[in-house]
Amino acid sequence: MPFAIALVALPLCNASCGGKDSSKIDEEVFMTSWVIESLRIDSVESIDCLVVNLTYFQNAQLFLPATRLTCNHDFDSDVADVVITDSLHVNSRNALFNGVYAYSLCLDQKRKLIGLDLVSATTRIRMSRLLTDYDAFVRRYRLTELCSP
């Protein structure tokens, strides 16, 4: 549990009120803590493979949770290098997360959360951004796309 608390308390990104061009989402959007809500591997829900469902981006790195042996993905937590362009390139020792992901932000209006979908050839990850001023973030990035259920 201390590990989970530490992840939540790690760097937070404050979204200010200025407007941004929504067609160009900058790296700053990623740099915070996220809750992994869904992990689909080859179309099979695999969230239970994670030891903890928290992660965060910081300084071009993604801090990944450990995975369980029972899921044939037994890896310790990892710090993966990431490159964010029009896609997210994750260079991880953990084959489960390693790869190139298309990404999109969406709005969960009911829960007032910012969602992030990462999709690769075999993996789909849905995350929600922690500790974000939802209304300010929506104004700043002019987001309108709603998260699919």
Image: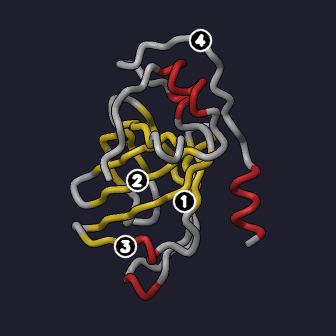
Residue 105: x and y in percent read 40, 36
- Find disc 2 in the rendering and name its residue: 126
Lateral position of residue 95 relative to residue 130, left or right: left
- Find disc 4 in the rendering and name its residue: 18
**The residue positioned farthest toward the front in the image shown:** 110
Q: Which mark is residue 46?
A: 3
Foreground residue among 110 and 125: 110
Q: Identify the residue at image location x=62%, y=16%.
A: 17
- What is the secondary structure assignment of the residue under circle 4? loop
> What type is the residue that disc 4 sits on?
Gly
Q: Identify the residue at image location x=70%, y=54%.
A: 8
> What type is the residue that disc 3 sits on?
Ser
How far apart, in angstroms, are the residues tagged by discs 4 and 1?
31 Å
3 or 4: tag closer to the N-terminus? 4
**Vertical relation: 143 (above or below) 83:** above
The reply to whether dot 3 and dot 4 touch (C-beta < 8 Å) is: no
Task: Bin the neighbour count of mark 4 within 10 Å (Cα to Cα): few under 14, some 14-19, many 20 and up.
Answer: few
Q: Nearer the viewer, mark 4 or mark 1?
A: 4
Q: Identify the residue at image location x=44%, y=43%.
A: 108
Q: Which mark is residue 92?
A: none
> What type is the residue that disc 1 sits on?
Leu
**Vertical relation: 54 (above or below) 28:** below
Q: Nearer the viewer, mark 3 or mark 4?
A: 4
